[in-house]
Amino acid sequence: METKQFYVDTTLYKGRPEQAENRLEKEIRVYDLLDSLGIEYERADHDTADTIEDCEKVEEIIGVDICKNLFLCNRQMTKFYMLMMPGKKPFKTKDISQQIGSARLSFAPAEKMMEYLDITPGSVSIMGLMNDKNCEVQLLLDREIAQSEYVRCHPCINTSTLKIKTSDIIEKYLPAVKHNYVVVDLPNIVE
């Protein structure tokens, strides 16, 4: 069976696409919001990024390390979290659970991701918080991400990747979408 070659446009674009056709409405809403807030961003376009290998190819173009975005919930599904962490760090729920005072965390179901963030699996992104009007999702930032110069994220669909200054996310974007964040410390090594 022949595997499909992952395509990445090697141009790093400044700002929104010139043409909006073939773009989802939710993606265009991301660009509209970022532009209205005066947030500058660069963009790489590519095929659907389904694997870490695909994301590494995008990393070569965008120049920012992979950022894992995980959508989590407590056992009762009464609290939801988006965790942004370096792509190369291991993830164990106990490392986060203890820090946020939750007995047990697991991956939240796709239907909750769609309900709160208007995002499908594979496209989880901090940009989805703009769709969380009732602030049902708590943002958790690994300290390395919070202290990095740039973050990379999808514009609510994983066929483009954005490079945005972390300070713009924290100082402009999060207040505009009425979300705060909690800094967490994930260990770099597997026990």
Image (cartoon, grey):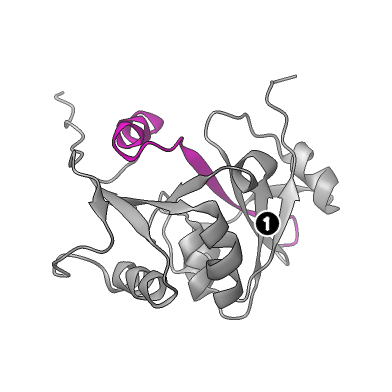
- Residue occupied by mark 1: 73
Location of residue 30 in the rendering, given as x and y in whole percent from the top left corner: 38, 69
Helix, strand or loop at label 1? It is strand
Location of residue 113 in the rendering, given as x and y in whole percent from the top left corner: 51, 63
Name the image quarter holding the C terminus.
top right
Report crowding for label 1: few under 14, some 14 to 19, many 20 or more residues within 10 A (C-alpha).
Answer: many
The amino acid type found where label 1 is placed reads: Cys
Figure check: 114 above or below 64: below
Residue depicted at 16% across the width and 23% down the height: 1
Residue depicted at 52% across the width and 42% down the height: 68
Tell which of 45 and 117 is nearer to you.
45
Location of residue 103 in the rendering, given as x and y in whole percent from the top left corner: 84, 50
> Left or right: where does residue 87 sit relative to residue 118?
right
- Is 74 contained in the magenta span? yes
On the question of residue 177 being in view, the answer is no
Tell which of 20 and 63 is nearer to you.
63
Residue depicted at 65% across the width and 34% down the height: 91
Residue range highlighted in magenta: 50-76
> Left or right: where does residue 117 sit relative to residue 60?
right
Image mark count: 1
Location of residue 142 in the rendering, given as x and y in whole percent from the top left corner: 66, 44
Residue depicted at 54% across the width and 60% down the height: 169
> Left or right: where does residue 159 sit relative to residue 21?
right
On the question of residue 129 being in view, the answer is yes
- Is 25 contained in the magenta span? no
User: To which quarter of the image does residue 147 belong?
Assistant: top right
Tell which of 66 and 166 is nearer to you.
166
